Image (tube, rainbow, N blue to C red):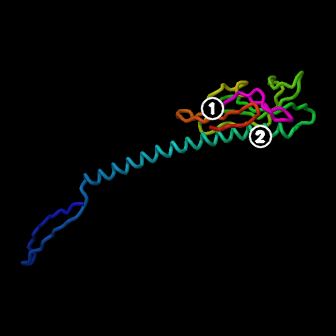
Amino acid sequence: MKNIKNKKTQKNNNHIVEKSNIKGFTLLELMIVMAIISIMVAVSIVSMTASKNTMSLRTSQDEVSSAIKLAQSYALQGRIPNVADMVCGYGFRFTTTTHYQIFYYTKGATCEPTDTSKYKIVEEQDLKNNVSLTSPAPGSNSRISFDIPNGNASYVSGTLELKINGAGLAKTITINGAGLLTEN
């Protein structure tokens, strides 16, 4: 802030009146303050976007892990949704990069979960917030099955990788043969 001394003299009824010390900001000072505020706003917007992407990815990872654990829980319980069905186990799979299902499979000639015509869908969901499965490919490669009554995993794909489209963030879910999940 600069003091702008502007002395003006003026005669008024034989008296001299003096005006001085007018204070204010220069245009340059105002522009510098506006530039600093703009930089601070831009940095905070970038930080908030990165934080939102991280939280969306973590939420999707938790959602998929919970769905897998739910399928395993159904198998451990020996849940039979329809008395007429001879249920062999429960499973989880991605049908597209953003759509997944919990299903049970019934006995055909054998109790193998490879025949998708024996699948009965229990629940379906879509991933939200631009999150998708990147590895493995949807379908049989992303299928995990749990046998009734022990809940052991069969046809385990190993690791599911979720990513946010357009961002470099990724989260993984690893399933071992005993059906234990590890999230990274």
Identify the secondary structure beneath mark 1: strand
Nearer the observer, 166 or 18: 166
Please state the extent of the stretch shown in magenta in the rendering. Answer: 143-162
Q: Quadrant of residue 76?
A: top right
Q: Relative to 111, say whether 82 is above or below.
A: below
For label 2, the crowd category at 10 Å Cα-Cα, with few meaning under 14, some 14 to 19 and many 20 or more, is: some
Nearer the observer, 123 or 24: 123
Nearer the observer, 101 or 171: 171
Residue type (three-letter) at the residue carrying disc 1: Glu
- Percent x, y for residue 101? 74, 33
Residue under the point 61% across and 29% down = 134
Q: Is residue 100 left or right of residue 50?
A: right
Identify the secondary structure beneath mark 2: helix
Compare marks 1 and 2 and give the one earlier in the sequence.
Answer: 2
For label 1, the crowd category at 10 Å Cα-Cα, with few meaning under 14, some 14 to 19 and many 20 or more, is: some
- Percent x, y for residue 80? 88, 37
Mark identifier at residue 134? none
Residue under the point 59% across and 34% down = 163
Residue assigned mark 1 = 161
Rounded to the nearest angstrom, the CA distance separating label 1 from label 2 is 19 Å
The quadrant in which the N terminus is found is: bottom left
Mark identifier at residue 70? 2
Q: Quadrant of residue 64?
A: top right
